[in-house]
Image (tube, rainbow, N blue to C red):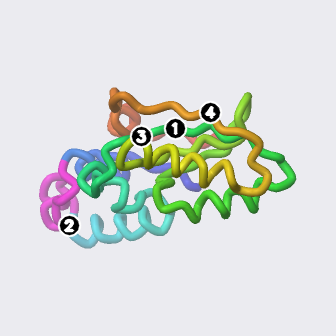
Amino acid sequence: MQPLDLTDTRLLQALAKDPRRTVVALAQKLGLSRNTVQARMAQLEKKGVFLSFERRISTASLGYPLTAFIHVHVQQQKLAAITHSIAAVPEVIEAFGLTGQADILVRVVAVDAEDLFRINGKILSCDGVERCDTSLAMGELIPFRVEPLLDRGPRPAS
């Protein structure tokens, strides 16, 4: 991915502060032409800079007030199939491949403790999953953010 320049960074900072701002409003705020902002936005989208809108929807508002993190220990040769099976569980909202003790970190949401037990059982039942360690999130201390990185400015390409 090509590194972002200062104009891209300024545009992203403005969007981070007010994601509902229109292209015209962004252009006025940044002192750029509407066409420049629109072209930059298209380039940023093409580069995959923007995450899905889903990240901004509260799972609690959908009836899933509990969040848990499940460390999944797997048979490595079955990782692709396990990932596919875990992705089929609707309550799984994220998963990451890890180094260290566990192989996959899965973020899930649940209605209550009984629902979390059911979800954990679904993951445990995937062929190739050896065991799971589950931790209940007590509260979000630092929400997902990139603004501090934007404030640092673009980083040189390595």
Q: In the image, what residue occupies the spot 28% across and 54% down?
A: 63
Gap in Å between the C-alphas at discs 2 and 4?
46 Å
Picture disc at residue 133 = 4
Q: In the image, what residue occupies the spot 41% across and 32% down?
A: 137
Residue ID for mark 3? 113
Type of amino acid at the residue the image marks with label 4: Asp
Residue ID for mark 2? 23
Dot 4 or dot 3, earlier in sequence: 3
Type of amino acid at the residue the image marks with label 1: Phe
Dot 1 or dot 3, earlier in sequence: 1
Gap in Å between the C-alphas at discs 3 and 2?
44 Å
Q: Nearer the viewer, mark 3 or mark 2?
A: 3
Q: Quadrant of residue 87?
A: bottom right
Q: Nearer the viewer, mark 4 or mark 3?
A: 3
- Could you tell me residue 89's position as x and y percent? 54, 61
Residue ID for mark 1? 69
The answer to whether residue 11 is seen in the rendering is: no
Type of amino acid at the residue the image marks with label 2: Val
Q: Are marks 1 and 3 in contact (CB under 8 Å)?
A: no
